[in-house]
Amino acid sequence: MINKHSPIPIYHQLLEHIKHQIESGELQTNQMIPSEREYAELYQISRMTVRQALNNLVLQGYLYRKKGRGTFVGNQKIEQTLTGLTSFTEDMTGRGMKPSNVFLDFTITPADYSAAQALHLKEYTPVYEIRRIRLADDLPMAIETTYVPANLLIGLTEDIVHQSLYRHIEQKLGYTIQFAQQEIEASIADKLQANSLQIEYGAPVLCMKRTSYLANGTPFEYVISTYRADRYKFIHELARDADLKRLIYI
């Protein structure tokens, strides 16, 4: 497995080997892995090299440590493709997981500048502000703040949002949800996010901002979400633009 004559650093070879064992199911979630000394003896490499590989896997969320006990396999990340528009509830249900929420706040408030811009409203227009922790199988995945125009979705309640906002919009109100624009960037957890997501202060997180639109072009939702980077990853398929290739080769 370890090729000491390869140009690929030894620590990276070990990292990829352990990662493959986790992704293939050879190593199971919460299973304790061999110690640094055991890996070093098994592959005849230095403990410092082993430590570098394990530290990187901990940072990537594949492993976690328990003080005085050892290193264990972490929860596998949930993959969300960026090619379709689904709600968190729809996404988790489709994966066979149980979605749930912990509501932190549900109020009608004047839209601040960012929410007003995203929703094409005048500043201070009334909006629903919905703050909640998103869970899958009772594990916190994200902390989310949603802004919805109060004059568009009149009579929205916490119970409706608890069930599924998208289902209410499409099945009860008869609107068609068409598309969304979103941006994603890496960040680190502040104290509120760390407490809500049960992670360490300063742990890596994925921050997403999304504006969703109805078929008539009206924005109905502006969402700011912070996802645990150790449990979530986004996947996007890219296709080569045929028209662009023709322009280049002409």
Image (tube, rainbow, N blue to C red):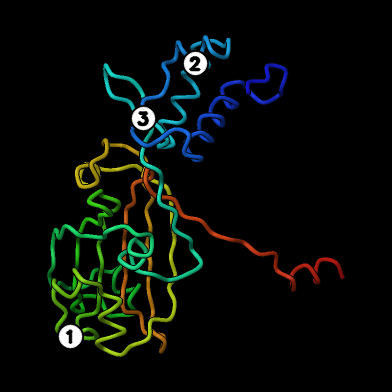
For the point 74% across and 71% down, the residue is: 242
Residue bearing mark 2: 39
Apparent side of residue 38 relative to residue 101 in the rendered image (left or right): right
Q: Position of residue 154 (x, y in %)?
A: 17, 85
- Please state which amino acid type lies under the numbered disc 2: Tyr
Q: Nearer the viewer, mark 3 or mark 2?
A: 3
Q: Which badge, 3 or 2, is on the more N-terminal residue? A: 3
Apparent side of residue 153 relative to residue 227 in the rendered image (left or right): left
Residue bearing mark 1: 154
- Please state which amino acid type lies under the numbered disc 1: Ile
- Judge by depth and name the residue closer to the eye, 205 or 108: 205
Apparent side of residue 55 relative to residue 138 in the rendered image (left or right): right
Q: Nearer the viewer, mark 1 or mark 2?
A: 2
- Judge by depth and name the residue closer to the eye, 184 or 56: 56
Q: CA distance from mark 1 to mark 2?
A: 61 Å
- Please state which amino acid type lies under the numbered disc 3: Gln
Asked if residue 183 is positioned above or below residue 124 in the image, the reply reads: above
Mark 2 surroundings within 10 Å by alpha-carbon count, few (fewer than 14), some (14 through 19), many (20 or more): some
Mark 1 surroundings within 10 Å by alpha-carbon count, few (fewer than 14), some (14 through 19), many (20 or more): few
- Residue 222 appears in which quarter of the rendering? bottom left
Provide the secondary structure element on which disc 3 rests. loop
Asked if residue 19 is positioned above or below residue 104 in the image, the reply reads: above
For the point 34% across and 61% down, the residue is: 92
- Residue 119 appears in which quarter of the rendering? bottom left
Residue bearing mark 3: 31
